[in-house]
Amino acid sequence: MIQKVLIANRGEIAVRIIRACRELNIKTVAVYATVDRDSLHVKLADEAICIGDHRLENSYLNHNAILQAAVNTQVQAIHPGFGFLSENADFVRACERVGITFIGPSADLIDKMGDKQTARETMIAAGVPIVPGSKGLIHDLAQAYQVAQEIGYPVLIKATAGGGGKGMRVCYDASLLEDAFNQARQEAFNAFNNADVYIEKFVEGPRHIEIQILGDKHGNSVHLFERECSVQRNNQKMIEEAPVQNLSSKTRKKLYDVATKAAKQVQYVSAGTLEFIMDKDENFYFIEMNTRIQVEHPVTELITGVDIVKEQIRIAEGKPLSLKQSDLKTNGHAIEIRVNAEDPDQGFRPMAGTLNGLHFPGGNGVRIDSFVYQGYKILPFYDSMIAKVIVHGSNRDEAMEKAIRCLEEIDLDGIKTNVDFQLEILLNQKFQDNVYDTTLVQTLLKGDKHV
């Protein structure tokens, strides 16, 4: 039985996990960098331990400091949230060595599915459709030229580790391959300490659809339906919605079948997400699996009533899933808007500063996941996302109107944010008509002052 959990993260996801633990009567321990001493997750946790300075390698990526804090506070489990150590198999093994439960999949599963190239090979074996690409990692530029020529341009050079759009470059021509290859490798190394990349065919103008799954240690698994994640800039998601409304029932069923088959094939445990790209004819291809909770998990929670964080904790305790596939139904429509401290007029440059005034919207069907408060100083060292506005309506039109109202109401004084740009997306005719794909933001930015 888990009685105390250390949250190896910061920001809104740390707050989200603390709240779920409180509702389960589980004590919490926050870890924080020196510059985060005034962060909300530190204030809300039962205990808080400083683990280093603002540099990630000295704090939120510091295995030894986090494990020492866990041992000293006598926790039974660590929840990694997303990012940081959430898909780090070495950290999971380190937890196991000191007898602490990692709330997530096993190290072997992370190795198999968290590494994108290995995941591709696993999905091929499971009969899941994948984008044509290299049969393994690309070790040098000569091999990159050869594989790109065989696949045919345009190609996508992609880091095998991590996620969040890091270590990815599209290349349309052989003359541009060297720069794209080197940039992808360098960015991957900087973000994940792993420069390994592979190459796959770049599907132009696709949609990005993903399936949420849950699996327990007893061989049970379910899907929690699908999410539309096609509003992206530089492969970073900006707005997500669920369920996907403009999808044929045949394709929807095939997506569910593929996802559940994949989960059973690898005997998946905990929360995970299978991500697909889909062309205009509804042909879909597996691109990666995230072996952790997703930023956009709230839209799934709002349409299913399932608390995914609580399910993760129960699964880690060895309990069977609290629900069966036949119990699950979708209810209404949900939209999530990511609020970032960034300036669209300056190429979306991250912003730092003090929030002099703060008002978040509310009302029926409105959820705010955040960690900021009036007087909070937004730091320049971490991801720029400061809040998520999540709305739920009886249908997509109602959810859209609610999302628009919320962005018109939100007030963040003292810091530049992307709220106005997100509102521009919500009001765009293609988004309104639900006929958009991953090129929507790029199209909005072309020839615009935001470029």
Image (cartoon, rainbow, N blue to C red):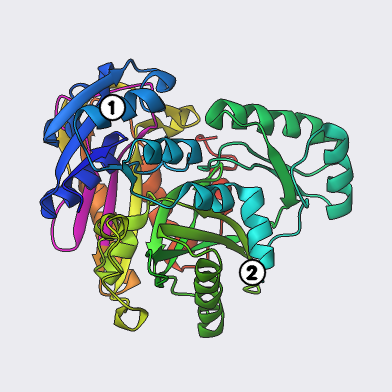
* Residue 101 located left or right of residue 372: right
- Secondary element at image label 1: loop
The percent position of residue 382, horizontal first and vertical second, equals 38, 27
In the image, residue 258 sits, relative to residue 195, either above or below, namely below
Is residue 339 shown to the viewer in this render? yes
* Residue 372 located left or right of residue 231: left
Pointers 1 and 2 in contact (C-beta within 8 Å): no
* Residue 258 located left or right of residue 60: right
Q: Quadrant of residue 398?
A: bottom left
- The amino acid type, in three-letter code, at marker 2 is Ala
Q: Quadrant of residue 4?
A: top left
- The amino acid type, in three-letter code, at marker 1 is Ile
The percent position of residue 127, horizontal first and vertical second, equals 67, 71
Closer to us: 152 or 116: 116
The residue that mark 2 highlights is 126
- Secondary element at image label 2: loop
In the image, residue 100 sits, relative to residue 38, either above or below, namely below
Residue in the picture at 59% in, 53% down: 439
Q: Magenta part of the protein: which range?
A: 362-391
381 is within the stretch colored magenta: yes
The residue that mark 1 highlights is 415
| Mark 1 and mark 2: Cα distance apart in space | 48 Å
